[in-house]
Image (cartoon, grey):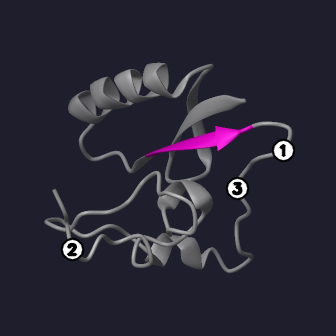
């Protein structure tokens, strides 16, 4: 499996063998290019991203000031499982 940094969901930027390496590079790119719309996606033989034909995925964007689940537990919506930003919003943060 590779963790791929993409720009605007379609433009391949770089790929890494681990999520930690991808996240480190993602943070550097985000600081250098704050206007880029970057994502980290897992891609491999049994994983990937399916894009809807109307590309409505672009209409679903995170909102500043809200908290989202990137990697959720079993049965919880999250971005990594393909849920939308709205579906992955954390309504209540427990500590």
Q: Residues within 10 Å of mark 1 (few under 14, many from 20)?
A: few
**Residue placed at 40% from the left, 29% from the top?**
23
In the picture of the structure, the residue carrying the numbered disc 1 is: 46
Answer above or below: position of 92 versus 95. Answer: below
Quick check: marks 2 and 1 in contact, CB under 8 Å?
Answer: no
Which element type, helix, strand or loop, lies under badge 3?
loop
Q: Which residues are magenta?
A: 39-43
Residue at 39% from the left image edge and 78% from the top image edge: 86
Q: Which residue is mark 3?
A: 49
Q: Point out residue 60 in the picture as x, y percentages from the top left corner.
A: 44, 75
Which residue position is annotated with label 2? 92
Residue 20, magenta (yes or no): no
Q: Nearer the viewer, mark 2 or mark 1?
A: 2
As helix, strand or loop, the secondary structure at mark 1 comes to loop
In the picture provided, is 10 more to the left or to the right than 84? right
Numbered disc total: 3
Residue 61, quarter of the rendered image: bottom left
Q: Residue furthest right?
A: 45
């Amino acid at each position: 499996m590779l963790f791929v940094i993409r720009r605007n969901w379609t433009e391949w930027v770089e790929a890494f063998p681990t999520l930690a390496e991808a996240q480190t590079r993602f943070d550097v790119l985000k600081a250098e290019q704050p206007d880029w719309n970057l994502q980290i996606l897992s891609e491999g033989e049994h994983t990937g991203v399916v894009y809807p034909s109307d590309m409505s995925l672009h209409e679903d964007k995170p909102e500043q000031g809200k908290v989202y689940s990137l990697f959720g537990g079993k049965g919880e919506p999250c971005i990594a499982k393909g849920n939308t930003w709205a579906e992955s919003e954390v309504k209540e943060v427990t500590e």
